[in-house]
Structures are given as structure tokens and as C-alpha cells.
Image (cartoon, helix red, strand yellow):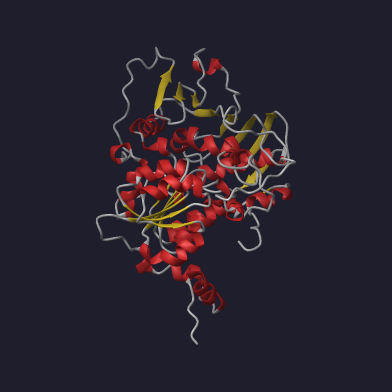
Amino acid sequence: MIKKLNRRQMLASLGALGVGAVELARSPALARTRPRRDKLNLAVVGCGGQGEENLSKVSGENIVALCDVDQERAAEAFKRYPKARHFRDYRKMFDAMHGQIDAVVVSIPDHMHAPVSLAAMELGKHVYCEKPLTWGIDEVRRMARLAKEKRLATQMGTQGMAHDRSRAGVEVIQSGVLGNVTELHVWTDRALKWWPQGIDRPKSTAPIPKRLDWDLWLGVAPFRPYSAGYCPFVWRGWKDFGTGAVGDMGIHNAAMPFRALELGTPSSADLIETSGLKAESFPAWSRLKVQFPARAGRGEITLYWYDGGKKPSADLIGGRKVADNGAIVVGTKGTLYSVEWTGGDWFLLPEERFRDYRPPKASLPRAPGESHHEEWLQACRGGPAAFCRFDGFAAELTETMLVANLALRLGQKISWDADKMETHGSPEAAPYIKRGYRTGW
């Protein structure tokens, strides 16, 4: 009797023979594949919350598969797309439909970004993944490497960078009008009033709702009993699942100046002040100092991070009101103040010096219709690479925020060796650099 193998079993068998899933994935023909149909066949993993928003942005394509571990949060999406096949387990979805899917949208908790995205890319699927790109630093490198090797169209959900004015801000900073940039201040009101942080693990447990597959929701994370304090949405503050305010909003608020200054990866991250460290969750608020070494064309730059309602001094922007979210780029000749998380609402200070200033001619591509998703969809069809693709900006920005989080996780200064992907003198950081997955994952 001949035993039929599913996709995962086939790849495992090839690995045992020395062929390997990665080598199979490197097939030039597979890497160059672009759908010839007018509409892409899309699978969406995570259909509630941000997943519902992302689904609305790609609704003009063929939605062929929907996957969510929470049937209640996915109910509306399942109802809206009755012809799509519905799944709870993304692995079963790929087993059943890998030949029918062109691209995948990933909108789930941080700790599962990499497992789902890597599985999709191994099968040659283009991927849109929410920010931050991954939970761990090793996962960042793997995501970037695989996307590049297989020449896939990828985009991280840094939606503010699709705004024309965000890209114009990059051009202004790079024009040199600010002089030598020495400091970057980035802040957010998260987690304050958004989700709890600075708390201990719940002591009580509750029955798992019938709508939720708790084991699938945990995925690669260590097992723990279910509590309503973990999901939905509030997972962001828990160290096993989310990346806190730094991972959630650092990706947004720092994006435009990070790209403009070409910061790359940091050399160190230090904890300046915090509300207090907890084993299970990130602090209620914190202040960090992240150092970037000099690169061609610029000197060292220090990034100061503030969250949980902490903000930089108003003196940096001439006494003006400091917004709830934003970034301040400090140069020797002037300052750029970027208001709120989109990066698109910025102005130069002091006003009298820049009253007659005219921005440089556009040199960066503009997103089609200021749509982050449409830019990715066009890349999937063989168009120009998306602005926030994995193998470049997205990976470097995510890695920076995860290095900053090492200082929060350990409560000490971290010296980062990007080449070796390790810390100097902090071996206890290893599990957060390369995470061990739960048995069976």
C-alpha cells in the first residue's frame, strides 16, 4: 500500500535524504514565479483586529483561505468570504492549499510572526507581515535571508511609510539641511491606557472558551494555563507573546528617521529608567538609550526612547507641546519634529530659519495611492520591491527594537555584536536572541 505524504511530511523526508526544504525552496523557477492571473490568490492568517483591517485592504484579490485560532474573532471574515476555505491551523492550511496560494497576509501575535511567515516563504509564497517582523533576533535574520534567497515580494506593516510626506521626510533629512545629526528622540503613549504592563502572571485560571484553540494560539511559546488576560490584543505586554511598547510603536515612530539616517543595527542598548522590572511582562514605562556607531557620511547617533507616557523635553522643540507619539531628529543646524506615528506630519525648527525652505526634489518612489498594501501587491505581480521589504529596512528596524528590548528583559546595558549576533558579557540574553520553540513546534 502506497502512503501519500502531505507537504510537511514530504519536506521532512527530503531532509532525511539530504535534500532539505531550504534547497527545494531555492529553485530558480520557483523563486521567479509570478501569478499570471489578474487577481492574486491570497491566504490571510489572523482575521480579527488588525487582521480584519489588513483583509479589507486586499479584498480586491481572490481570498482563497482564511485562518484563525479564534473562531469568534474570525466569524465576520468567514461570513464575508464563504467561498474561501476556513482553517484554525495554518499548517493544515498550507498542507491542503499550498498549490492554490500566491501570497499570505500574516496578522497575528508577535511570537507567531516568524513561524507562519517562514513556512509560507519556504513554499515560495509572497508575505505581508505585521510589525514587528519577529519576536526574536535570529528569526529576523532568517526572515530576511529567506526572502532574499527566494526573491519574494515582502512588506512589513509599517503603514505610515506609505505616506508621501513620510518619504519626503526621509529626503529632507538626507539632504543635510539639519547638519550633523547627533540625537534621535522617539516616544509613545503605549502601553499606558492601551494594554497592561508591569504586572505579574495571573494567579487564577479560567476555562478555555470553546471558540479558542489555546494550544494553537500559544504556538511556539512555552505552555501556560489560559487566562483572559492574555488575549486578544493584551498579549502585547507579555514577554512570551509580545514585544511591548518598544516593538509595537518603536517600529512606527522611529521608521522615517531610521530610514533617513540609515542607522543600521545598534552597538548597545541601556536602561536609563523604568517603573520596575517584572519577570513576565514589560515595564509600565521606561526610558532607554540606544547607541549607533558612525557610518560612512555621519558620526555616532544616540537614540533616546520613552514609553508609557514619558516624553522628551519640550525644550527640544522650542517649548511646543509634545505629542503623544512622535520623533525628534536633532542636528547641528536644525531639528525635525515628526508628530504622531505615521511620520507624515513633520516640520523643521526653528521656524524662522526654515520659513523659506523648499524640500529637495523627490528621489524616492511614492507608494501607489499611498497604499502600503497596494505597493506590496504590485511587487507580488513583479513590480518594484516594496519600501518596507524584509531583506533590508524591515529587518534592520526590527532588530534594533529587539536589541533595545534586551536591555528591558535583562535590566542592564547590552553591548551588541551584530556580526556575531550576540551580546558581550551577557550570556543570559541568548534565549531572546535565538528562541527555543515549544516541543512539537
Q: Residue at x 69, y 41 (%)?
A: 409
Q: Position of residue 238 (x, y in %)?
A: 64, 41
Q: Quick check: 277 left or right of 47?
A: right
State whether residue 268 appears in this view: no
**Count of numbered circles in the view:** 0
Q: Residue at point 46% right, 30% down? A: 341
Q: Nearer the viewer, residue 142 or 71?
A: 71
Q: Nearer the viewer, residue 103 or 230?
A: 230
**Rendering coords of residue 211 (x, y %):** 55, 49
Q: Percent from the top left, x then y, of residue 288?
A: 63, 32
Occupied quadrant, residue 86 = bottom left
Q: Is residue 210 above or below residue 297?
A: below
16 displayed left or right of 342: right
Q: Is residue 167 visible?
A: yes
Residue 96 found in image quarter:
bottom left
| Residue at 70%, 41% in the rendered image | 280
